[in-house]
Image (spheres, rainbow, N blue to C red):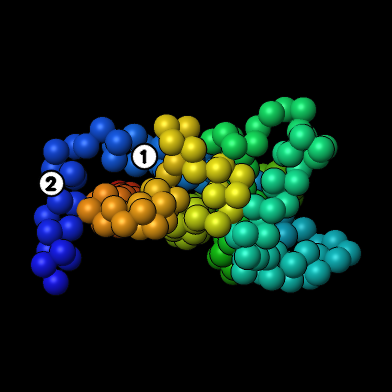
């Protein structure tokens, strides 16, 4: 119990003192996850809108596959991305393995099915309300998609938030493709695993507190943005 309290005290001191190593790891985590989130949203939102509006063969199959991929094991994603980016892989010439870019790619693959599936549910319900109106206005397919995406933007924030939560807490895939290299690819989750294994519980606890703090902060910011927008519409 004494060691636990001592570790907690040291962890809080590292945070309050703005430890350079701690700050570097936290900023890298934010960079990787937010970059992956932007790319995943740019892919997932239009895909979700297209699946809500467009009727085509195998549409239900695509939706079922997306829903199934929400539970895709991250280590499998890491393995597949590793194979693609390895020297013998098709993208090995790019030299992206064990870089933040490889970690972003892995997180994008993990986030897209989750974001697209959650967004599709909201957009599908909205499309049922807008269907007759938009058809009667004879708008183009692109205009339909843009209208749905804009009017469902608050629901899409929730989908983005779910994607962020999945990405910021990921460890398996980014450990495989990033290698947990100090000052290069080490992020909060991989650093926590490393420091815990080394017995450095103070730094591991500090990293854990920062991870929780970042997650809560992003949640509050997104909820605040949603509330501000809702109030502004009155």
Q: Residue at x 62, y 69 (%)?
A: 71
Point out the image quarter for the C terminus: bottom left
Residue 173 appears in the figure: yes
Task: Check residue 13 in the rendering and tell me which mark sits there, or answer none.
Answer: 2
Q: Residues within 10 Å of mark 2 (few under 14, many from 20)?
A: some
Q: Residue at x 69, y 70 (%)?
A: 68
Q: Position of residue 109 (x, y in %)?
A: 64, 51
Picture quarter containing residue 76?
Answer: bottom right
Viewer-proximal residue among 125 and 51: 51
Could you tell me how many numbered marks the image carries? 2
Kindly identify which residue carries mark 1. Answer: 25
Q: Is residue 75 left or right of residue 195?
A: right
SS type, badge 2:
helix
Is 95 located above or below residue 220 in the figure? above
Point out the image quarter for the N terminus: bottom left
Q: Position of residue 46 (x, y in %)?
A: 65, 49
Is 121 located above or below residue 87 in the figure? below
Q: Residue at x 13, y 46 (%)?
A: 13
- Answer yes or no: do the residues labelled 1 and 2 have beta carbons within 8 Å? no
Q: Is residue 201 left or right of residue 93?
A: left
- Label 1 vs 2, first from the N-terminus: 2
Q: Residues within 10 Å of mark 1 (few under 14, many from 20)?
A: many
Viewer-proximal residue among 158 and 72: 72
């Amino acid at each position: 119990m004494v060691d636990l309290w001592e570790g907690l005290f040291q962890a809080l001191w590292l945070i309050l003192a703005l430890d350079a190593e701690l700050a570097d790891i936290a900023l890298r985590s934010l960079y990787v996850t937010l970059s992956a989130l932007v790319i995943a949203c740019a892919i997932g939102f239009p895909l979700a809108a297209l699946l809500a509006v467009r009727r085509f063969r195998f549409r239900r199959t695509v939706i079922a596959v997306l829903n199934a991929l929400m539970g895709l094991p991250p280590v499998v994603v890491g393995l597949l991305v590793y194979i693609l980016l390895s020297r013998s892989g098709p993208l090995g010439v790019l030299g992206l393995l064990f870089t933040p870019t490889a970690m972003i790619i892995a997180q994008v693959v993990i986030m897209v099915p989750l974001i697209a599936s959650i967004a599709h549910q909201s957009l599908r319900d909205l499309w049922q309300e807008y269907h007759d109106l938009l058809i009667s206005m004879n708008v183009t397919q692109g205009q339909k998609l843009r209208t749905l995406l804009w009017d469902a933007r608050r629901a899409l924030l929730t989908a983005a938030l779910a994607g962020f939560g999945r990405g910021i807490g990921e460890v398996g895939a980014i450990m495989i493709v990033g290698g947990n290299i100090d000052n290069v690819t080490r992020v909060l989750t991989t650093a926590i695993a490393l420091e815990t294994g080394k017995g450095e519980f103070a730094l591991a606890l500090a990293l854990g507190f920062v991870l929780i703090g970042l997650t809560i902060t992003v949640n509050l910011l997104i909820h605040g943005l949603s509330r501000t927008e809702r109030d502004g519409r009155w």
